[in-house]
Image: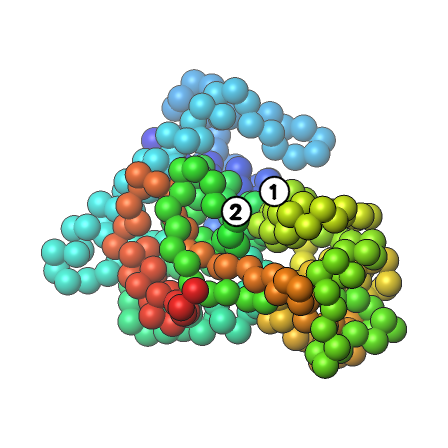
C-alpha cells in the first residue's frame, strides 16, 4: 500500500464512481479499478459495495476515509514543510468558493497565485456554502469561502467583504435599481431559496424572524443556476447579492431591486478547520485572498 492507493480511494469516493474519478485522475478505469482492488487486498476488506447505482462505502471504507485523508494531508504538509527550508512553496491545496462569487474573481486569484507559486497543485471547487462547511470540517478542503452566519463550531474564519442583498424576480416583474423594495415587501411573494444549511437561507430567515415576517419558500434548491432559472421562469423570487445576478440581468432574463428597511448585507468569510493549521501552500493562498479581497467590514 502506498499513497497512490489512498489517493485513488479518496478520488473514487468524492467522484461517486470509477468513471468520473478516472477522468479526474487521468487514468483508465481499469487502472483505477486495479488500484482499488490492490488496496482492498492489502487491507483484507472490501471498501466499496458494487451496486447498480454505483459504488457505496462499506463500514470498513467509512473507517478508512478519515484516516486516509489525514495521511494524505500529512504527506502534503511534509512535502511543503521540507521545501519551506529552501524558501519554496510547493505541495497542493484544495479550496472551495460558492457560485455566487462568480467565475472571474476565482480565475484571477488562481492566475495570480500560479504566477507566484508555480510548483503548487491547485484544485478549486465551486459549491454551496453548506457543502463547503462540511468539506472543511471533514478535512476534504484546506480553505473555503463561506457566508456568515454559516460559521460552525470547529471552523476559524476571517471577514472579507460585505454584499447587499437584492430582490430578484422574472423580467416581467419590472424590478429596477431605482426603485428599492422594503424587506417586508420582498418576502410577501413565494420564495426560492437554498436549504437551511446554506448561509443565505440562514441570513434571510434570521432577518425575517426578527421582523416577525413568515417565509413562503415554495422550492428549496441548492444550485445557483437552477435558482436563477426558476426565477426567470416566474416560479418565485429570491434574494441574492448583485455580483451573482449580473449576467442574468445583462441578458434581460431577470429583474432586480435593492432591499431596504433594513438593508440586508451578507458577509463573506475565509475559513479553515480549527486545530488544523493551513499548510504552507494554503497559507500562501490565504495571504493572497486577504491581499486581493479583504475589505473593511
Examine the rendered structure and indicate whether residue 124 appears above or below residue 211: below
**Residue 125 % position (x, y):** 51, 56
Examine the rendered structure and indicate whether residue 88 appears above or below residue 275: below
Residue at the image position 55 percent from the left and 23 percent from the top: 58
- Horizontal side of 39 relative to 19 (left or right) equals left
Residue at the image position 35 percent from the left and 41 percent from the top: 274
- Horizontal side of 215 relative to 150 (left or right) equals right
Residue at the image position 74 percent from the left and 68 percent from the top: 181
Q: Marks 2 and 1, Cα distance to the nearest angstrom?
A: 8 Å
Mark 2 touching mark 1, by CB under 8 A?
A: yes
For the residue pair 289 and 3, the one nearer the viewer reads as 289
Location of mark 2 (residue): 150
Location of mark 1 (residue): 197
**Residue 192 % position (x, y):** 76, 54
Query: What colour scheme has been applied to the protein in the rendered image?
Result: rainbow
**Residue 253 % position (x, y):** 79, 73
**Residue 265 % position (x, y):** 57, 62
Quadrant occupied by the C terminus: bottom left
For the residue pair 259 and 10, the one nearer the viewer reads as 259
Amino acid at each position: 500500500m502506498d499513497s497512490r492507493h489512498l489517493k485513488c480511494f479518496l478520488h473514487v469516493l468524492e467522484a461517486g464512481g470509477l468513471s468520473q474519478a478516472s477522468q479526474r485522475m487521468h487514468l483508465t478505469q481499469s487502472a483505477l479499478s486495479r488500484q482499488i482492488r490492490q488496496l482492498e487486498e492489502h487491507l483484507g476488506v472490501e471498501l466499496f459495495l458494487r451496486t447498480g447505482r454505483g459504488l457505496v462505502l462499506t463500514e470498513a471504507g467509512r473507517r478508512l476515509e478519515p484516516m486516509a485523508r489525514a495521511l494524505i494531508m500529512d504527506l502534503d504538509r511534509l512535502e511543503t514543510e521540507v521545501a519551506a527550508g529552501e524558501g519554496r512553496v510547493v505541495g497542493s491545496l484544495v479550496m472551495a468558493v460558492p457560485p455566487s462569487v462568480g467565475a472571474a474573481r476565482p480565475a484571477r486569484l488562481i492566475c495570480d497565485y500560479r504566477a507566484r507559486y508555480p510548483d503548487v497543485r491547485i484544485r478549486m471547487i465551486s459549491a454551496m456554502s453548506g457543502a463547503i462547511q462540511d468539506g472543511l470540517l471533514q478535512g476534504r478542503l484546506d480553505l473555503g469561502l463561506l457566508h456568515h452566519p454559516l460559521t460552525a463550531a470547529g471552523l476559524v474564519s476571517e471577514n472579507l467583504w460585505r454584499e447587499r442583498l437584492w430582490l430578484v424576480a422574472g423580467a416581467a416583474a419590472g424590478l429596477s435599481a431605482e426603485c428599492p423594495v422594503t424587506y417586508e415587501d420582498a418576502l410577501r411573494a413565494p420564495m426560492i431559496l437554498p436549504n437551511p444549511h446554506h448561509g443565505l437561507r440562514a441570513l434571510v430567515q434570521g432577518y425575517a424572524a426578527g421582523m416577525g415576517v413568515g417565509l413562503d419558500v415554495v422550492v428549496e434548491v441548492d444550485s445557483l443556476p437552477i435558482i436563477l432559472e426558476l426565477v426567470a421562469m416566474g416560479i418565485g423570487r429570491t434574494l441574492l447579492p448583485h455580483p451573482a445576478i449580473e449576467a442574468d440581468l445583462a441578458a434581460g432574463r431577470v429583474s432586480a431591486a435593492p432591499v431596504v428597511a433594513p438593508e440586508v448585507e451578507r458577509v463573506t468569510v475565509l475559513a479553515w478547520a480549527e486545530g488544523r493549521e493551513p499548510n504552507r501552500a494554503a497559507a500562501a493562498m490565504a495571504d493572497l485572498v486577504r491581499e486581493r479581497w479583504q475589505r473593511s467590514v
